[in-house]
Amino acid sequence: MSHVKTPIYMDHHATTPVDPRVVAVMLPCFSEEFGNASSRSHAFGLRAEELVDEARGQVAEFVGARKQEIIFTSGATESNNLAIKGVWESYRSKGGHIITQVTEHKAVLDTCKYLESQGAQVTYLPVDKTGTVSIDDVKSALRPETVLISIMFANNEIGTLQPIRELGKLAKEHGIVFHVDGVQATGKLPLNMNEYGIDLFSFSAHKMYGPKGIGALYVRRNDPYVRLSPMMRGGGHERGIRSGTLNVPGIVGLGKACSVASTEMSEEVSRVKSLRDRLEQGLKSGLEDVFLNGHPTERIPNNLNVSFAGVDAESLLSGLTDDMAVSSSSACSSGGLEPSYVLKAVGTRPDLLHTAIRFGLGRFNTAEEVDYVIDRVISVVRKLRAVSPFYGDSAKNK
Ligand SMILES: Cc1ncc(COP(=O)(O)O)c(C=O)c1O
């Protein structure tokens, strides 16, 4: 078992390695094909423009959209900011009410909080114990002045998938713009903006085997035509919505990452899902008192978030650092370790809040790695439980 190379990377919700096929198409963009995609007066610029155009096509196809609906950004944080602030500024005359949910990523929550300081009214809906928002709650939150519903596709901690299709339908019936933070869902399930009724969709290359610092926002261009105020003003790039010289190597990388995902997704998803299930079963058969956080079935295929009763997640991580890269659900703050707001929102038992570990499997993980991880986690959890004042004596020797 020890022939696996450690530390094993199992933190693919945080970021992914760049696929070598993506690196290969990016490299020439740093040297021979380095032109500015806006320089129309010479071959270097025209070639760069051609590369961007090809990548835009790959990205559009991947999300089931048209080329002219893709705006390149620096990543999903920027896409979320652009979508939410852009809609709010553009539709202010209609009203300033936004609906979102408490388990969104900070890039959505903090943007909404900022807009509240500018006069917006924001409803933060709760979620149930699986992390799912209720359609009825969204319906009851609707007001005549609601201009935006922003709900993520899949949660980055617990992996819960939201009822996006139903939400899209509801938004359309009421003529409200529907934004989806799709970061954790891209590459995990087939996407089509019309089928899901999505008007704005944020995603990021580094979560899907592409490079960091590049992402995109899908912006619907008909039925309805979504208006967005720009946040970056300047040379009028990206239809005036996002000025700034285009990141050609990044865009080419995102395009390739999308085309690889398009062709390999169904095979990859079933492989990764079976590894994830093997991990879950392995941990549960070797240990008592392991609790799944999130939805038992409606979750992304690579996510496993579990609480190990009686074990402090930070101590577990320290015991595992040489073996694997996984993540705890606590966030560092000035006052120490804050329990995850997502775990709190799903009503996790207080004694389990600091015991959760997120495993994020990915394209290059193997069954041997999963078995090694199971073995090491079981061993460290047992050791920690044996000395834990928070774990019952009767259970210690199991
Ligand atoms: C759900 C979600 N939204 C947004 C982001 C931010 O993405 P980026 O790193 O591309 O800014 C992340 C990254 O952790 C995420 O998981």
Image (cartoon, helix red, strand yellow):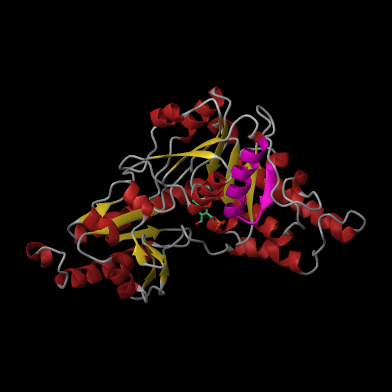
- Is residue 76 found inside the magenta-colored segment of the image? yes
- Res. 364 in view: yes
Taking the spot 72% from the left edge, 50% from the top edge, the residue there is 242
Task: Residue 88 in the image: state x and y as whole percent.
Answer: 61, 39
**Is 348 displayed left or right of 10 in the figure?**
left
Magenta-colored segment: predominant secondary structure: helix
Residue 282 in view here: no
Question: Which x, y percent locates residue 367?
Answer: 37, 61
Q: Is 89 placed above or below 165 here?
A: below
Q: Could you say which is closer to the camera, residue 104 or residue 373?
A: 104
258 relative to 250, above or below: above
Highlighted range, magenta:
70-90
Q: Where is residue 288 in the image (x, y as percent from the top left)?
A: 17, 58
325 horizontally vs 353: left or right: right
Give the quarter of the figure containing the C terminus: bottom left
Q: Is residue 79 magenta?
A: yes
Quadrant of the image for the N terminus? bottom left
Residue 74 occupies which quadrant of the picture? Answer: bottom right
Q: Which residue is drawn at 48% across and 60% down?
A: 14
Q: Residue pushed farthest top?
A: 173
**Residue in the picture at 39% in, 28% down:** 136
Residue furthest to the right in view is: 41
Viewer-side residue, 253 vs 179:
179
- Tally the numbered discs: 0
User: In the figure, is residue 306 to the left or right of 118?
Assistant: left
Residue 20: image quadrant is bottom right
